[in-house]
Amino acid sequence: MRKVKADPKGVLTGAHYLDGDFAIAEGGLAAGCRFFAGYPITPSTETAERFSERIPFVGGIFIQMEDEIASITALIGASWGGQKVMTVTSGPGFSLMQENIGLAVMMETPLVIANVQRGGPSTGLPTLTGQSDMMQAKFGSHGDYEIIALSPDSPQECFDLTIKAFNLAETFRVPVFVMTDECVGHMHEKVIIPPADEIEIIERKWYQGPKDKYLPYKPDKDLVPFMVKAGDGYRFHTTGLTHDERGYPVLNAEVQDWCVHHLVDKIRKNAHKIIELQEDQIDNAEVVVVSYGITSRVAIRAVQLARKAGIKVGTMRMITVWPFPEKRIKELAGKIKAFVVPEINLGQIGREVERCAFGQAPVIGVTHCGGWVHDPEDILKAIKEAVR
C-alpha cells in the first residue's frame, strides 16, 4: 500500500468556520475523491451541495442521481474505473443502499458513505437528530460480512475521519461508513485544514504484474487482493455471486466458505490496526461511560459532575464503532462495577457492550428515541446508580 501526499488542488487549507456536512465534503476532496453520486436527503444535503460547488474545480465529477439505489450503483462502477468515490445520505436513503452495499462488499469495492443520521424509522424526524442506524451499518445487508464504520463528534473530526475512511477503504477494499448525525452535521465550529503535504493519503494497491496473470480476488499476504482499473487492458470478471479467485461464479459450499471467510477475515484479523478509541481516566475507574458521536460531547458534562462528586469514572469514546472493540470491553468488564452507555436510540450499541462484557459488569443504558440530545443529568443519574 503506497502512502502519498494529498493533491493540493483538492485541499482548502487554513482555518475555516464550517458545519460538519461541509467538513465531510472537504475531507473527501482532500482524500482524493473525484467522483460523487448522490440524492438530496435531509440532514445530509449540505455535503452534496458542497461537493457540487467544489468538485469541478479539482477535475472531478458530481452527479445528482434519481435515487439512492442509483447513487451507490454509480459509485461501484466509478470505483472499478479507478476513482476514489463517495456519497452521503441519511436513514431512509441508507436503507435503499443496503442491497448494493452487499454487492460492494462481495466485489470488494472501496467506497465511502457518510450517513448523517436522523430520527427514524421510516421518514421519522427529517430535521432532528438520531443515532438509530448504527446496527444497520453493520448488519443492514444480507449474508455474513464485515465493514468499517467511524463516528465523528465534531466538524473537525468530520474532516479528519472522512480522510481516514478513504484510507481504510483503499487499504482493505471495503465500503467504509462515516456515521455522523444531524447535530454534528449542522454544528458550526472551527475546522483546521492542513496543507496538502501534511495530509497522508493511502493509494490503492494496484496490480503491476503480467496482464494475463491477474486474479482480482487472490488475497495478498495482508488478505487484501490487488486491483486494476477497468479499461486498462486487463481481462477480469467480477460479480455479486459466490466466486473464486478469478472472479468467476462457483456455486458450491466449499467456495462459499472460502469466499465469505475471506470477506470477514480481512477485517477481523486486522481489527487491531483499524479500531481507534479515545480513553480518559480508565485506570482505577469504577464506572466507564462508553459513547460515540454527539452523545460523547454531552456525556462530558455528566462525567465532570460525577468526578466532582468523588466517583471514579472513566470514558471510552468509540471513534471506530465497527469493527467493535470487543477485546477492550472484555478487558474492562472484569475490572469495573458497570458500563454506562448513552445513545440516541433504544440501546443498539449498549447491547453490543453487554454481549462483550459477558456478565462480568452490568450495562446501564441511557437511551431515547431521537429528536434531541441527552440531558447530562440523566447520564449523571446512571453513573450514580452504577456505584450504589
Image (cartoon, rainbow, N blue to C red):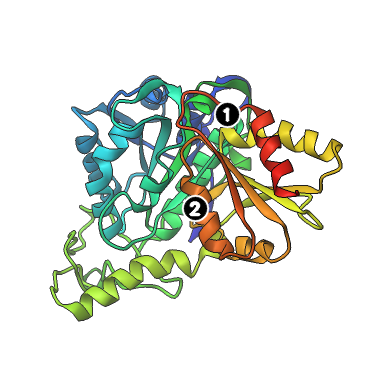
Q: Is residue 279 visible?
A: no
The furthest residue to the bottom: 254
Camera-side residue: 9 or 153? 153
Q: What amino acid is labelled 1 in the image? A: Pro
Say which of marks 1 and 2 sits in front: 2
Q: Quadrant of residue 333?
A: bottom right
- How far apart marks 1 and 2 lie (CA) works out to 28 Å
Residue under circle 2? 351
Q: Residues within 10 Å of mark 2 (few under 14, many from 20)?
A: some
Residue 249 lies, with reference to residue 167, above or below; the image says: below
Point out residue 195 in the picture as x, y percentages from the top left corner.
62, 34
Q: Quadrant of residue 204?
A: bottom left
Q: At 54% from the left edge and 28% from the top edge, which residue is drawn?
A: 184
Q: Residues within 10 Å of mark 1 (few under 14, many from 20)?
A: many
Q: At 49% from the left edge and 53% from the top edge, which residue is drawn?
A: 351
Point out residue 105 in the picture as x, y percentages from the top left corner.
30, 56
Camera-side residue: 270 or 55? 270
Residue under circle 1? 155
Q: Is residue 22 left or right of residue 380?
A: left
- Mark earlier in primary sequence (1, 2): 1
Camera-side residue: 68 or 374? 374
Point out residue 11 in the picture as x, y percentages from the top left corner.
53, 31
